[in-house]
Amino acid sequence: MTEPLEIALSRPTALERVPRWDFEADVIVVGFGAAGACAAIEAKRGGARVLLFEGAASSGGTSALSGGEIYLGGSGGTPTQRAAGFDDQTEDLYRYLLMAGGPNADSAKVRLYADNSLKHFEWLIAQGIEYKSSYIAGRCIEPSTDDCLIWSGSEEAWPFVEQARPAPRGHCPRFVGMGGGRYVMNILAKRALEAGVDARFNARVQALVADESRTVHGVAVRVDGELRFARARRGVVLCAGGFIMNRGMVKKHAPFLLRSQYPIGAVDDGSGIRLGMSVGGAAINMSEGFTTIPWYPPDSLIKGIFVNGCGHRFINEDCYHGRVSSYILRQSGDRVWLLQDHATYAEGEMHKLARIEIGATGETWEEVERELGLAEGALVDTVRLYNRDAAHGKDRLLHKAAQWLKPLEEPPFVALDCRIDYCLYSSFTLGGLDTLPTGEVVDEDGGVIAGLFAAGRTTCGLPRWGEGYSSGMSLADATFFGRQAGLRAASTNR
Amino acid sequence: MTEPLEIALSRPTALERVPRWDFEADVIVVGFGAAGACAAIEAKRGGARVLLFEGAASSGGTSALSGGEIYLGGSGGTPTQRAAGFDDQTEDLYRYLLMAGGPNADSAKVRLYADNSLKHFEWLIAQGIEYKSSYIAGRCIEPSTDDCLIWSGSEEAWPFVEQARPAPRGHCPRFVGMGGGRYVMNILAKRALEAGVDARFNARVQALVADESRTVHGVAVRVDGELRFARARRGVVLCAGGFIMNRGMVKKHAPFLLRSQYPIGAVDDGSGIRLGMSVGGAAINMSEGFTTIPWYPPDSLIKGIFVNGCGHRFINEDCYHGRVSSYILRQSGDRVWLLQDHATYAEGEMHKLARIEIGATGETWEEVERELGLAEGALVDTVRLYNRDAAHGKDRLLHKAAQWLKPLEEPPFVALDCRIDYCLYSSFTLGGLDTLPTGEVVDEDGGVIAGLFAAGRTTCGLPRWGEGYSSGMSLADATFFGRQAGLRAASTNR
């Protein structure tokens, strides 16, 4: 008992060692991104006194770096979906999200979200986020306009299209240009502050405070350089992002993501996850991550084909850019090309940003093959087979939909170089604390850790499989399950 | 303080709640497989009073289910290697093991092992394990004889052969037939008991006992149905296997392993890992696992080629069966075939066991292609390109070594069906507690957890990448690092 008090993310501070409470609240929220803002708003609505600690000097987190789109639908469609002619059914949303969650999908979370997605849209609007009732039919990554509804996943592509009736579900806010995440975050943060959430900035949580039965009672937090202790009478909600910027953690848990040159994160140093683990919270699915390279738009590029270092195709190119990129990252070797002919080629809108450059050109595919240094026939055979299938309107190898099939036979031909070790594949992590749909953090055996909640990329939520990720799933997860965590924390009695 | 005492793997029992010590020792070892036996032997040699708890009715664990081969070499070669003409150098062993460890290899453990592998062989012999000085030149999985030295990895295959001079390093004990792991375990267990290790069977450890600073002081253990408390004055060593038999854990951490139909484990319910996590031990690399299907011997089958559901090759077939299988499991879809011609085909020695059956035959590859329902040209193009390269003695696509190249042109042709959803791919986990080379368990930040040690598949050790696994690496890791953990625990003062 005479040891100096050691404060560490990976060890809870014992309740009896806390010298004093510098702050007291019912609910303490850690992190002021989308999950933290929504948790705070709802905890406040649930009658709690809410204290929020944000390590940075302002709100936003990684959510503010996003495009701001949110994956929504079901219940016959959001007003925006219905206006565009899509009567999106809850069961289709459910099946799509379940498949998109991969082999470890959380059916309870998917169920709750699918059933309540429409109401969640209404809630977002009630917070002040505006949406136009407009629809973009072509493929885009983020609209450069203030239009709303986009195709932001693999809904129309094999094999998803066989499981669920497709609908566009990416809802972008009424914000002109890219970067709508900042707009969304400004509104949510303002709303939280107006509701009376006591937010402290430059306040980095250093440890959880727990008793011997591992019930969480508060946090140790460094505010403006001073160590403070904050008591949470009902619960602590961890909303501190993922761990993509902590390269040591990435190496230990998701080493394949080190292949990506462009980690996306504001802080995302894994501190939220490590705090949860310090009291026995289970971190699951830690090897999974999102990765992408923005190889389209324009749409015409989707009519091209990707080949790996063997000259083989490996994915139906009409699925979501992130799914294509996940498949790229699981190829052996770094060499990957996107083949186009004169009719399909166009400079990609984001190719410069992503460092996608021309790797080879030729008047024949033989010439391209030689220029790339591929084995004789390796590329030519692939194109011949694809062209024959495309001419028949049926991709027997990889099931690309007929509308994207066109023989690549109009010279000149081009191979766009998408090599993994040069192009900017972006990435973030999808593993994190295991939580119930209520936001309660559980241990490896499924037991609830009293007083501890989490949401957003600190948890393993709706999106948990790079191959199934769709734009808007993270914000959907962070906002919706942030709300659940805040509500549950506020209603906790102990 | 009046709560009933709850005993759970995922929560340490507070030291002050322990009602009495039913047992006391210096070092407590949990699990009596290879890691536990070696830890106990060395802790005893280090002067400790050693108590060992094994959940089963006898010793052996998953080690006893193995072939008993141990991956050894370096320092100019073991006597067996030298007798066979291989002057295996330490740096080659080091480079091979480092590459085999994959993107998250532990260079400190690899260094220690490579430098001391020869001495470790001497230690194993000193325990009473006998080895003949004989060498099997062809590929085998486990000798059916009592011969010793085998090629048990991808040493001669690309890309390993470019990193390290190859040598056979799988050392099988002098035991006739398969299942040498039982023989090895009987000797190690006998040795531990003779040395005075107090082993208790049917004794399942239920929780760690820790103080508020998370120092481990003992265990709560159910012995013959009664809950007992055992004090470890110096340390607890967790050697309780991996988690392949805990299907819930596999789903949460390594869902791709659910594709394998044949998990290999004695207990391997993750209890050792969960105990370590309960006091903040970091579990790393949890998504990785070993998987294999014994598609060779005989050697001639290596001259065939594997193709996936697109008819594409994806791996140089001359690498270790487990590496081939890891690549198979990362293909999309379940369909995989091994193509052979009349000259190369032979019924595999273990094909019945693995459920590898004939999927199609034909007098031409076109006929085989049709029978398999593949797109026209998908298989034929692949074989044509391979045959041309094989005729020139150079596999430009996937770098299979020249000695295994032969055009597949002698009818009849056969496609052996290796489909993932039917054949018996076996598997075990490679993720686990993060430890120092001393066996000390560390937390997510690298801080040592006082009083806690681990070894074997409860940890993430030398083998941590399915694509690099080689037979004998697990027993090498378990025996060598079991020893380190036992020695370090015995010398701990507190």
Image (cartoon, coloured by chain):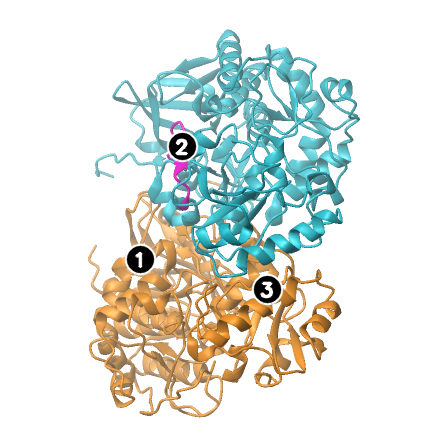
Chain colours: A orange, B cyan
Tell me the kind of residue under disc 3: Ser
Kindly give the residue lying farthest to the top in the view shown: B194
In the image: residue A334, left or right of residue B285? right
Secondary structure predominantly adopted by residues drawn in magenta: loop
For the residues marked 1 and 2, what is the alpha-carbon distance in whole angstroms? 24 Å
Measured along the vertical axis of the image, is residue A276 above or below residue A476? Answer: above
Q: Nearer the viewer, residue B10 or A174?
A: A174
State the residue position of label 1: A106
Q: Please rate how many residues cluster around mark 1, counting C-alpha atoms within 10 Å: few if below 14, some from 14 to 19, many from 20.
A: many
- Residue B76 in view: yes
Circle 2 — which element? loop
State the residue position of label 3: A260
**Which region is colored magenta?**
B259-269
Q: Is residue B263 magenta?
A: yes
Tell me the kind of residue under disc 1: Asp
- The x, y position of residue A328, in whole percent, is 56, 63
- Residue A280 in view: no
State the residue position of label 2: B268
Q: Disc 2 is attached to a residue of which chain?
A: B
In the image: residue B341, left or right of residue A270? right
Circle 3 — which element? loop
Measured along the vertical axis of the image, is residue B144 above or below residue A82? Answer: above
Measured along the vertical axis of the image, is residue B449 above or below residue A333? Answer: above
- The x, y position of residue A463, in whole percent, is 39, 64
Circle 1 — which element? loop
Q: Residue at x 48, y 10 (%)?
A: B193
State which quadrant residue B279 falls in: top left
User: In the rendered view of the protein, which quadrant contains the N terminus of chain B?
Assistant: top left
